[in-house]
Amino acid sequence: MTNKIQISILKPCGENWETMTLAEKGKFCASCQKKVIDFTSFSDREIVKYYNQNSKVCGRFNTEQLNRNLVLPKEKGSIWMIAATSIIAFLGLGNQTAKAQEVVKMEQLDEKNQEKKIQETKKYTTKKNKTAIISGIVSDGKIPIPGVYVSVKNSKRQTATDLNGNYTIEAKKGAVLVFSFIGFKSVEKKVSTNSKVNIAMKEEVMILGEVIIIKNSNED
């Protein structure tokens, strides 16, 4: 059984987030006399967990976090979890080649190193798979943005921009690159013959207001 959960804000608040006083996990609104939790970096599960512990919550969200179904699997029993953890730990010791999704490490590269990296990657690109090396800079239109998550849609290929906003990724012609970063609208760009793709991201609209969560139980 799974719980389908939807997060909504029925009456958005027009108060200015920037002028509010800093508080734990968010800010304090002097006008409403309420604490406003900053949920923009929370996962779906973290949002629901916080709401379950605090029935009346005023929060700040990215628009893409709202008005969509979140599917949260039912928690397993503690014995099952212990057994599963033991098995995973055992397999991890026996298989050093297993990989887990991690936050991509960023390294500061100057222009020469960036160009060298592109050239080295091209050496391993074959005509058989018809791939291209795409590189560029991701910015907000003025300033480069480090740590932007860059991935090839519907694949496991991914990277992140360095401290200067530079990225390099291999993709087939016709594939779609996805650029995402907290606080900004995601951007999708189709790969063409152009190997240089600079992206300008726009800030995501933030919505403030009292959180409403609707739960519906469905059996799988």
Image (spheres, rainbow, N blue to C red):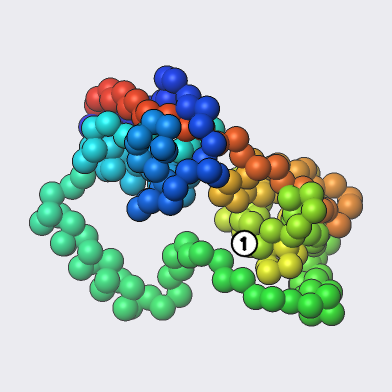
Tally the numbered discs: 1
Residue assigned mark 1? 147
Relative vertical location of residue 75 with respect to residue 94 in this rendering, above or below? above
Q: Quadrant of the N terminus?
A: top left
Q: Is residue 211 left or right of residue 187?
A: left
**Is 66 on the left-hand or right-hand side of 109?**
left
Residue 33 visible in rendering: yes
Left or right, residue 51 beside residue 182 = left
Is residue 59 shown left or right of residue 199?
left
User: Residue at the location (79% across, 77% down)?
Assistant: 110
Inspect the image, locate mark 1, and give the three-letter code of the amino acid beneath it. Gly
Q: Residues within 10 Å of mark 1 (few under 14, many from 20)?
A: many
Q: Residue at x 21, y 41 (%)?
A: 53
Closer to the camera, 3 or 17?
Answer: 17
Could you say whether the residue bearing mark 1 is in a helix, strand or loop? loop
Residue 38 position within the rendered picture, expressed as x and y whole percent measured from the top left: 43, 45
As displayed, is residue 46 above or below residue 212?
Answer: below
In which image quadrant can residue 147 be found?
bottom right
Quarter of the figure with the C terminus: top left
Residue 101: % across, % down: 47, 62
Residue 66 visible from this viewpoint:
no
Q: Residue furthest front?
A: 30
The extreme top residue here reads: 10
Query: On screen, 21 above or below 146?
Result: above
Residue at 60 percent across and 35 percent down: it is 205
State the image coordinates of residue 26 (x, y, percent, origin top left).
41, 48
Which residue is drawn at the image coordinates 41% and 25% (left, top)?
Answer: 8
